[in-house]
């Protein structure tokens, strides 16, 4: 059974493993925990039968006007079950009253976010991938 949580209470580091697949230098589990703890809003999808986190979404915000959702991930074996959509709906609920919630995604994910009411905007981003790839999150 999938449950949704808004904190890390009772969640072990082992239950947080298996994310950031394909990243050139993924954060360690301890750094991942820190990301979750320091986010303005967080929603975790929890498989109570397997005692593991199977998806998550995070948001950062100025707490008044705008929020940014930098991370949304659902483990591959749980995708296409509506979990990602539910994570977005629940984090939007936590961010209620904000003027904007911005997301940057790869082109192949645009249709997913469009189905949830997001629209493409012109924007710019700076990524430090070459330096990032040589950096280890520990």
Image (cartoon, grey):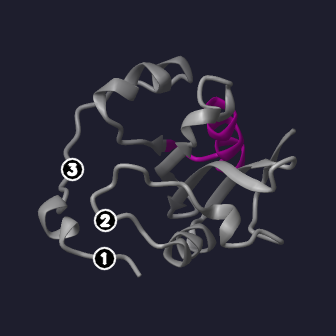
Residue 96 seen: no
Kindly identify which residue carries mark 2: 25
Quarter-wise, where is residue 51 in the image? Answer: bottom right
- Residue at mark 3 to residue at mark 1: CA–CA distance: 22 Å
- Residue at disc 3, secondary structure: loop
Residue 94 rendering spot, x and y as whole percentages: 70, 50
Residue 74 rendering spot, x and y as whole percentages: 58, 41
Residue occupying image coordinates x 23% and y 32%: 122
Mark 2 crowdedness (10 Å alpha carbons): few <14, some 14-19, many ≥20: some
Q: What is the magenta segment's predominant secondary structure? A: helix
- Residue 136 numbered mark, or none: 1
> Which of marks 2 and 1 precedes in the sequence?
2
Residue 82 rendering spot, x and y as whole percentages: 67, 26
- Dividing the image into 4 quarters, which one contains the N terminus? top right
In this picture, is 15 found above or below 123?
below
Q: How many marks?
A: 3
Residue 103 rendering spot, x and y as whole percentages: 42, 42
Question: Do the residues bearing badges 1 and 2 touch, measured as CB atoms within 8 Å?
Answer: yes
Span highlighted in magenta in the image? 84-100
Residue 136 seen: yes
Residue occupying image coordinates x 20% and y 65%: 133
In this picture, is 127 found above or below 7?
above
- Residue at mark 2 to residue at mark 3: CA–CA distance: 20 Å
Residue 97 included in the magenta stretch of the image: yes
Quarter-wise, where is residue 135 in the image? Answer: bottom left
Kindly identify which residue carries mark 3: 125
In this picture, is 26 found above or below 70?
below
> Which of marks 1 and 3 precedes in the sequence?
3
């Amino acid at each position: 059974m999938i449950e949704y949580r808004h904190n890390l209470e009772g969640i072990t580091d082992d239950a947080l493993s298996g994310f950031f697949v394909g990243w050139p230098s993924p954060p360690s589990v301890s750094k991942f925990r820190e990301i979750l703890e320091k986010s303005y809003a967080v929603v975790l999808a929890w498989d109570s039968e397997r005692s593991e986190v199977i998806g998550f979404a995070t948001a950062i915000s100025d707490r008044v006007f705008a929020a940014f959702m930098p991370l949304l991930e659902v483990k591959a074996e749980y995708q296409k079950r509506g979990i990602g959509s539910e994570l977005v709906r629940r984090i939007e609920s936590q961010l209620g009253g904000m003027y904007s919630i911005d997301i940057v995604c790869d082109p192949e994910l645009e249709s997913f976010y469009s189905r949830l009411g997001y629209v493409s905007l012109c924007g710019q981003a700076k990524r430090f991938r070459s330096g990032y790839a040589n950096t280890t999150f520990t």
